[in-house]
Amino acid sequence: MGLTEIRTAMKVDLKKPAAEQPGLHNRWHPDVPFNGTIKNGEVVKIECVDWTGGQIGNNDSADDMKNIDLTKIHYLTGPFEIETAEPGDVLVVEIQDVQPFQEQPWGFTGVFDKNNGGGFLAEIYPNAAKAIWDFEGIFCSSRHIPHVRFPGLIHPGILGCAPSAEILAEWNRREGELISTNTDSSIVVAQPPEPQNVHAGSASDEIKAKVGKEGARTIPGRPEHGGNCDIKNLSRGSKTYLPIHVKGAKFSVGDLHFSQGDGEISFCGAIEIAGVITLKLTVMKNGMKDLGMKSPIFLPGPVEPHYGPGRYLTFEGFSVDHKGKQYYLDATVAYRETTLRCIEYLKRFGYDDYQIYLLLSCAPIQGHVAGLVDIPNACMTLGLPMDIFDFDISPSGSATKMDMGTCAFTSK
Amino acid sequence: MGLTEIRTAMKVDLKKPAAEQPGLHNRWHPDVPFNGTIKNGEVVKIECVDWTGGQIGNNDSADDMKNIDLTKIHYLTGPFEIETAEPGDVLVVEIQDVQPFQEQPWGFTGVFDKNNGGGFLAEIYPNAAKAIWDFEGIFCSSRHIPHVRFPGLIHPGILGCAPSAEILAEWNRREGELISTNTDSSIVVAQPPEPQNVHAGSASDEIKAKVGKEGARTIPGRPEHGGNCDIKNLSRGSKTYLPIHVKGAKFSVGDLHFSQGDGEISFCGAIEIAGVITLKLTVMKNGMKDLGMKSPIFLPGPVEPHYGPGRYLTFEGFSVDHKGKQYYLDATVAYRETTLRCIEYLKRFGYDDYQIYLLLSCAPIQGHVAGLVDIPNACMTLGLPMDIFDFDISPSGSATKMDMGTCAFTSK
Amino acid sequence: MGLTEIRTAMKVDLKKPAAEQPGLHNRWHPDVPFNGTIKNGEVVKIECVDWTGGQIGNNDSADDMKNIDLTKIHYLTGPFEIETAEPGDVLVVEIQDVQPFQEQPWGFTGVFDKNNGGGFLAEIYPNAAKAIWDFEGIFCSSRHIPHVRFPGLIHPGILGCAPSAEILAEWNRREGELISTNTDSSIVVAQPPEPQNVHAGSASDEIKAKVGKEGARTIPGRPEHGGNCDIKNLSRGSKTYLPIHVKGAKFSVGDLHFSQGDGEISFCGAIEIAGVITLKLTVMKNGMKDLGMKSPIFLPGPVEPHYGPGRYLTFEGFSVDHKGKQYYLDATVAYRETTLRCIEYLKRFGYDDYQIYLLLSCAPIQGHVAGLVDIPNACMTLGLPMDIFDFDISPSGSATKMDMGTCAFTSK
Amino acid sequence: MGLTEIRTAMKVDLKKPAAEQPGLHNRWHPDVPFNGTIKNGEVVKIECVDWTGGQIGNNDSADDMKNIDLTKIHYLTGPFEIETAEPGDVLVVEIQDVQPFQEQPWGFTGVFDKNNGGGFLAEIYPNAAKAIWDFEGIFCSSRHIPHVRFPGLIHPGILGCAPSAEILAEWNRREGELISTNTDSSIVVAQPPEPQNVHAGSASDEIKAKVGKEGARTIPGRPEHGGNCDIKNLSRGSKTYLPIHVKGAKFSVGDLHFSQGDGEISFCGAIEIAGVITLKLTVMKNGMKDLGMKSPIFLPGPVEPHYGPGRYLTFEGFSVDHKGKQYYLDATVAYRETTLRCIEYLKRFGYDDYQIYLLLSCAPIQGHVAGLVDIPNACMTLGLPMDIFDFDISPSGSATKMDMGTCAFTSK
């Protein structure tokens, strides 16, 4: 007893390229080698780079956002061998803390260019944009989006165990089918395996080539293991139950978010950070069968920010798009319309569309299903916490436009 | 001063067919005549029949559910003339109370037959089913779904002002276009105007015929006025801002729900009741322009049931369906998969699929957008409050099957 | 099945004097006769008069408050015989609903005259005062205290089972001792049995005389059975575990409050109403021993109004009184000072002291223990929900006085 | 822009005696010299030792607790000069984060010996005892109190600005009066100035002697400036408004608590830690007059742990003590009884009295005022969050005793 510290299972170096750090990787593949071992039931700290591996700077230009190299993302820390874990078990991941690095108390939210990444509203807002957020303890504020300030519901965007070879093959089959049957050349519907910039940790060249050829991109979450779910509620105190598909689990984590809104609509939409996550990892033997589980389940933690239900100004959206086209029970269209209604509302106070697009991506907005059965309209709602603003945004009449400055745009 | 009561602006008679009561109507049309006048700022009580107009009985057979006549629904109370209301104004609707009738302290949740109404999971669960809920104060329980009990977040499924003729024409145009371009004959994508069983309140035969021919069905919510949004949070204490499109507003309300889950997945999914709603109705002049509003917005009330975030067991669903087909950012598919994950989980305790399908439709589950940008997968979550069960459903290992009886099914 | 209603176990008549209604009583005594029987596990409605039995009117004078006859209070409904209940059992009381009578949608909050009842701040505010509250659904507002409006956390001030003869004797002993040793003639420290205006329900004259001579006053709550605890959280959905001391339990209930603040500081401090309470009553055999229980315990319900912790403006008070006298860890003095700090704060907006005194008595303020060990100072806090005001009361600088009218005072 | 860190206004050295560190002090006196300057509006980190200055070890004996030297406590960090602050202004202290030191992830809760410190239940539990808590991120657990685990509502026990000479004189007058009039020699009612072990920071010997002779002990909170209020809700995100009495404010902070229950009943009752607090300090000119403020006020933060109201098992206590003595509206007695009811309840599961006494001191229990006007009984409640236990403590019948080990006791 006496002075003791929680073990750091993996460190990262923020001054070194992510591609050169063997503790990181950027594809899902069962052959990415283990990067250390964690005992069943152990509490460890794991350091993570930001999801882009440091491509975005703390400055006032969105050029880096526009020119981002998406073949590199996401850089995850791991995979870790969890002792005693076998396929069919469940890995219980209790998130005990997430913190940005003390020496880097800031993060970024971005809109990608329509032709390099895009986002939920890319058709309407095709240009790159950026906001930098500064942290003061648990709060954040941005010089690019004035008059808002909120506590972060800090969490990892990505948690998961490696797929088995069979599951990986299924991913490539079904996503390949979607790509091959897509008839709209203006959108990228999915990303196939990508050898360029593949990072397979400490793998040999041979294995690395295999991972490049077969490895699943980290962009989508997937039902069999979780992955990039971008669930804002996987924050401090949450407990996630992850399916295990390979011996030792091969658990990886990354894409830390200081805060995110439901939907993470601008794609680089959370407040993206490098930082440290503290986890307790416990194996539940035969958990997949015992829990009847095909996809991860979780219990949120007891310390989410709470404002009271009456403090959420809530917008409604339906599956009729802004051009008047009617869709059949399309919740995606309905949620997109809801975000547009909120943008229109907030513009009245002087914010620019891109500022609001960035804000709704990262502030703790609540995106809810309302009705999904009343043909032909899905109805979705978006709850905006009024208390994150330092002025009154409640619906009390006409609004006074304020000088809201600007977010970061590209250089010309 | 002294003994005073809130005025009841419209009464209904639960023993008389809804079709014969002039205070009701079942289509949206600007020509449905006013049914009384409400002062600007007045607080009134309004009585409502259940949305089917009494077609469903408190018994143990789902035959009535299977044979329901959907041309009759929904029976709404109104439309009311709101003094001073003009097109372009906003009607602020503060819901001060909703109560089931004292002499009818029960409600119903149903699954329709796939060929007569269907629902969110109709492809998997094609048969009619029913659960009756008994009310004890603010709580409800069902002999058809044992071991659950919860307080109602009581609310109206439908609130709205009549469309103008122009808006009605636009509804018919765009929904007609969806119907005419639908190539899947196995599904009904939308309902066009339906003269059969039209109820236009106290309208003349001529007007009634016009309403039958042109009037919009009440099934979908629509962005221009709200309508059947099925938003569970429009409960006591909420304040909804509704666009006004015709002189006098022509406000109607109905489809009262004792409780509903996000999505109302079984379509007749809420706990459907007849009852009384107490409203304060206030006109905000020029509100649509001043609030920059194209669709309703609202503030929920401060008295929603709250269990603490850590008490919601949460399931994840992705836009990959249960047959292995990959969809592109389809939140509807993702939410459907989430509900299936929850059904699988709860079946382990002995519940039948249909019991859970009914339960998820009406219990206060939280359906959230997680990530909607990580191509190709949308991720949606469903939070199930564990405290509504009288046994422990937390993920602690294999489950013990209990005798859960049965919900009501059809007679053969 | 079909139309069914919850049984009303006892009705009251608001137009008849409480003293003439045999279903009521106003003393605690084991010999008050049963007023009906309730099955173990039954759900019943019970009607209650207001605690004064109708002495206070809906008008703008506090004369009735000044001249109140306190020998009459509180009129409780009961006592009920609960089948199977025996001494040593526990009565589990689940409150399923509380409602004011529809035909009497108002309540009152009062300050008594220092010489007839007094209150927590009687030394400072010695005069009688009154506020009438009007109900709109779950909300209330008062013409006597403008610019506030809040949902009621509706509850009974009094719940309890009759004492045994032994327990009653102990009450009379210890309270008699306090009275006999009191040396400060300016305060009434406790009320001994009072034959005047005793109401023993349907008792014979002989029993009634005995009850008058021995029966405990209903004013204080007492550890052995609960009684007048004035716990605002015993609202809808709460479950209280009451000790049973006599065969059949002899359960009584009354003193309904539409809302109350922690402390109920003005004594007639809640929003006092007549109304109907819906209860489920269940006997837990041998519960007192099994639960190791000497006093009632309870679980609050899940539907309390919630504003978010950051919406409570909180005041601090210490056990140093406003004259500069230091007390030793006296939480009562500390809480009194806290209320004075809040009164000073709110007066800046134009409210009169008595208006605030009334408001703090009945609005849902949170009175917390902070530190009770830091000799010599107890520290207590009072949290005032800012969202009950329709103007901004946050601490942002000097305040603008508004015209706040007046509460009801006595006629001269 | 780029990598930036928040300035640390004062560091401490955990390996060096607190008495030798000039950045600390342990008495309130206007002449303790400034220890650095903070800009108006600046965000700074401030390091703090634990309140005893390191007297308590991470071990399994309570000998250190028994033999503690209370003349040394509390060691505070400061006082800081806040630029522009003048008497009459208000210092707005926004707590942005509190963290234990990474290299010391543990804290202690203690019961003092009745003859050296005592505590709220010293008469009943006169012996010293101790529990060590280990931190895993935001959670804590103790080898001395098994089967409990909870997130910390981390906060400073002490915040305040120095008194003016006049205020200090008033403190000494009124507390001296209490001491001089105390007739019960078995209790220490207050602590007068104490030259022994005085620490006046970097003061000269002369000043130090003056501070020892006149300086107020840090033990009690006091209405004029706050100080040792032990308010658990002054946690992350809270904003406290502190009166300023001397030029430059002379702000000090310390006594960090990882968690505390309302009342901090065992006196050394919080989970006491050394750590770092991040604050934003802003001067509100003329704030005392503008806010009408005699004592600090505060707004809690939006991130308190929340379990839902129905998850608090709540006990009732009255101003009748366990010997049957009746007190007059004594909230302190009532709260003491409430804690005893809770101890009795939890003992049934196998916990020892001292374990529970320690637990109720530091777990996030809610101590509320219920009724404070129903003569002669005050009623207080204590809400215990059931979700901090890993077994079910709900009142469902007789309890099963478990092996609960033991807390730390003294060596014989």
Image (spheres, coloured by chain):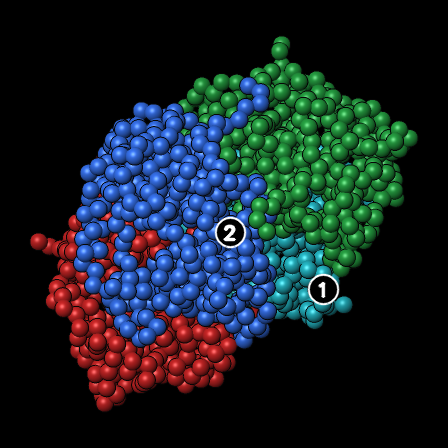
Chain colours: A red, B blue, C green, D cyan
Residue D58, image x, y percentages:
59, 67
Which residue type does callout 2 highlight? Gly
| Residue located at (24% from left, 64% from top) | B184
Residue B326, image x, y percentages:
27, 71
According to the picture, the residue beneath numbered tag 1 turns out to be D399
Q: Nearer the viewer, mark 1 or mark 2?
A: 2
Left or right: where does residue C281 sit relative to residue B293? right
Q: Badge 1, how many Cα within 10 Å: few under 14, some, many 20+?
A: some
| In the rendered image, the vertical position of residue A205 relative to residue D400, given as above or below | below
The answer to which of C70 and A254 lies nearer the viewer is C70
The chain letter under disc 1 is D
The answer to whether residue B89 is seen in the rendering is yes
The answer to which of C390 and C286 lies nearer the viewer is C286
Residue B48, image x, y percentages:
45, 39
Most extreme residue toward the left is: A412
Which residue type does callout 1 highlight? Ala
Image label count = 2
The answer to which of B82 and D54 lies nearer the viewer is B82
| Residue located at (58% from left, 18% from top) | C59
According to the picture, the residue beneath numbered tag 2 turns out to be B57
Left or right: where does residue B372 sit relative to residue B166? right
Residue C125, image x, y percentages:
63, 22
- Give the SS element for disc 1: loop
Q: Badge 2, how many Cα within 10 Å: few under 14, some, many 20+?
A: some
| Residue located at (41% from left, 24% from top) | C400
> How far, Cα to Cα, is label 1 from label 2?
44 Å
The chain letter under disc 2 is B
| Residue located at (26% from left, 88% from top) | A207
Most extreme residue toward the front is: B205
- Give the SS element for disc 2: loop
